[in-house]
Amino acid sequence: PEPSTQALKLTNPVVTLWYRSPEVIVGSKKYNEGVDVWSVGCIFGEMKTRIAMFRAENEAAQLDLIFQLTGFPEGETLTRYEQIEQWKNFNTNKAYTNNFVSRFSAASPITHSASSSHSGFGRSKPNPTQTFDVDGLDLLQRLLDIDPARRISATKA
């Protein structure tokens, strides 16, 4: 059966920080199975690159790392985030743009590198074992969509 799109009122501190969805990080108390799909996306990326996707030590840094990859929310997505009371407590760079292709495409000169900064991302020679083909990259982006309303369901993934 298709997962429920109805959000339940739940608690914020679910799952290890590195695998926590952005809506939960900013304090949303209403979420659905999409938070688990986000975690699966983090694990999917980690399995391919052998490095945790987002390795921050606190929630603000975690959200920053997420937006460095996904881009800063825009339009309706940003409006939904702004409705979460704790959103205003996060001072995130609004200039971030989507970097999935530049970080994970085999054609890109930027790859995921274990020896780089705390985020795990850095510039190095492309490593085919750490990049995704077109379908893999598409799935990763759908699993890690910052808009819970657009995030792919487990059934469709």
Image: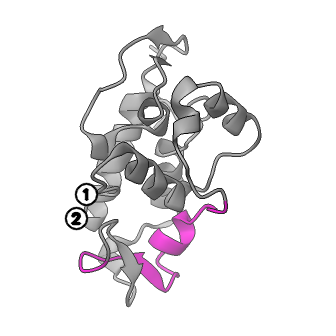
- Quadrant housing the N terminus: top left
Q: Amino acid at mark 1?
A: Met
Task: Tell me residue 50's x, y (percent).
Answer: 22, 64
Dominant secondary structure of the residues highlighted in magenta in the image:
loop
Task: Tell me residue 8's x, y (percent).
Answer: 46, 9
Q: Amino acid at mark 2?
A: Arg
Pointers 2 and 1 in contact (CB under 8 A)? yes
Task: Tell me residue 131's x, y (percent).
Answer: 40, 71
Q: According to the image, label 1 marks what residue?
A: 47
Asked if the stretch drawn in magenta spans residue 73, the answer is no
* Residue located at (55% from left, 15% from top): 5
Q: Toward which corner of the image does residue 94 lie, by quadrant?
A: bottom right
Return the residue found at the far right: 75
Q: Which residues lie in the magenta part?
A: 95-116
146 relative to 24 in the view: left or right: right
Q: Residues within 10 Å of mark 2 (few under 14, many from 20)?
A: some
55 relative to 155 in the view: left or right: left
* Residue located at (34% from left, 55% from top): 54
Position of 13 relative to 61 (above/below): above
Task: Tell me residue 93's x, y (percent).
Answer: 59, 58
CA distance separating discs 2 and 1: 5 Å
* Residue located at (32% from left, 69% from top): 120
Asked if the stretch drawn in magenta spans residue 99, the answer is yes
Instruction: Specify the label residue 50 is tagged with.
Output: 2
- On the question of residue 103 being in view, the answer is yes
